[in-house]
Amino acid sequence: MSNINRRLRKERIAKILMQASGIIITGSLFFIIGTILYKGLPYLSLDMITKTPQGGFYIGKEGGILNAILGSLYLAGLSTFLATLIGIPICLYLNIYSKKGSRISRFSKLVFDVLFGIPSIVYGAIAFSIMVWLGVRASLIGGVITITLLTIPIVVRTIDELIQTIPTDLNHVTTSLGATRWESAKVLLTYIKPGLFTAILLAFGRAIGDVAGVLLTTGFSDNIPVYLDEPTATLPLAIFFQLSSPIPEVQGRAYASALILTFIILFIVICTQYLASRQKKHKV
Amino acid sequence: MYAIPSIETEKTQSIIHQVNPHIQIKDLNVYVEDQHILKNINLEIPNNCITSIIGPSGCGKTTLLKTLNRLLDDSTEVKVTGSVLVNGEDIYGPDAEVTHIRKKMGLLSQKPFPLPMSIFDNIAYGPKIHGNRDKKSLQAIVERQLKNVGLWEEVKDRLDSSASKLSIGQQQRLCLARGLAVEPEIILGDESTSALDPISTQVIENLLIQLKQDYTIVLVTHILRQARRVSDYILFLYNGEVVEFGRSEDILLNPQNEITQQYVKGFIS
């Protein structure tokens, strides 16, 4: 009897712990959104998202952060695109072309685990030293290269996890129908399509929110970038600069910028989930 | 009842002379990670018959089946020696082209695994990758193969809906139709009914019996009663070795080897 009581007590403790973690996580999300809404909403104006900084913007005068919004979207969009373009073939090679558990696939997975864990400032520093050596100034392309390197491991790791969940039967089915590896790979991609969007989203989220990687490589500019070799403003850096200002008006705008960044990410999450749910039609 | 041949080898020899072998296995050895899984297999699988591979778990039944369409190729640390001749052509030979070999053999796996596409596309997938782009011809193939497995009447109005919405039994028939659509010569079944209910099992078994007119069928099964119901020939594998091979009634009713006797009587499983 005492045994069953002890087991039930453990059951209750486990349940309380799980509920507590749930509350902490959702609580912090609401706290973050609440804070930026409370501090940022009064400063959010149409000017903020339609204008670039005018003279005196950083001391509380006219202008907006359109330069940083577009800069971040260009940077994150391009990097995610490139990372996906490079990451998917790597995953297909590791899972379909190379033999399961072979030395090269195990070694590559270790490499991506290590790359996954390297802080973005290290990528930034390395990219910066290469740029100095090449005589290239801080620019959009510098940022894109750095952030692409940063997001490739994310894309590879997430897609690899996805592929691991697929039964080997899928490969057996296609190969036993006489499919080549490439044809099998195409079926595999259709199979993981809904999850693919999540992988791309994760990479985009990391790319748009990264500060350290762009700090040294992308620079900052009040103008909207037109060419790849121009310095480019990014939202996280715009938030950082405004927040360091002693002027309350500018600090308030920093929270408004944070609000914009959060909404961009929220918008992309919703779009991704919608696309993913539409793709589930033929999921087994 | 049955005439007992004096020695086993003599009996095996007599079978080989009677039938027309479709698959000839010569001195086949398979090693997986230094373990000797299949030991010196010599075998002739007859044309247009159902041959069942029986034996206890882990005796190498599935490995032997996978050797036949080179599905083991994708695993590391697998070593295959010896030869497997299909219509006299060595599929492990230097000139053998693996996708071509696999096209000749339809595989029906343990659990039905529809591809993530519609019913129509599941069947049309094989012909499409082999170059058939003609819509009318694809439609004809889909209809013919679905009729072949008795699924046409059940699905003809929803060919565009997802294959995963079918019942498990229907899915397995779909997988069989998908395999037949690439016009194989041989059907390999790896415990193909183990995930099915008794009625679906019966449907699949009856289908296989009908199909043997046009195909050579090799089944792996761990159900002796199934082997009795469907097979013309039975191969008993034990510890990766061929213990006995012969006509189904001979193996089941009158096994020559002591281990076969014990397995058939249910003392080992």
Image (cartoon, coloured by chain):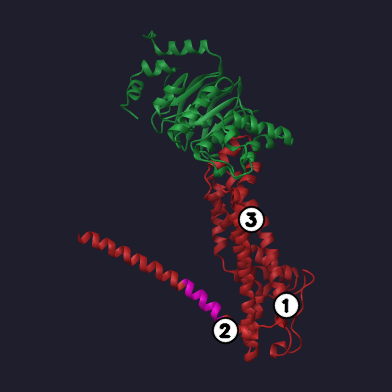
The x, y position of residue B223, in whole percent, is: 40, 29
Q: Is residue A130 visible?
A: no
Q: What stretch is highlighted in magenta?
A: A25-35
Chain for mark 2? A
Q: Label 1 belongs to which residue?
A: A66
C-alpha separation, residue under disc 1 versus residue under disc 2: 22 Å
User: For the point 72% across and 90% down, which residue is it?
Assistant: A61
Chain name for mark 1 = A
Mark 1–mark 3 distance (CA, rounded to whole Å): 31 Å
Q: Is residue B253 left or right of residue A232?
A: left
Q: Do the residues labelled 1 and 2 touch (CB within 8 Å)?
A: no
Residue at position x 47%, y 18% in the image: B232
- The answer to whether dots 3 and 2 both sit on one chain is yes
Q: How many marks?
A: 3
Residue A33 counted in the magenta span = yes
Task: Kindly identify which chain the residue marked by label 3 belongs to.
Answer: A
Considering depth in this image, is B41 or A243 the residue closer to the camera?
A243
User: Badge 3 is on which residue?
Assistant: A87
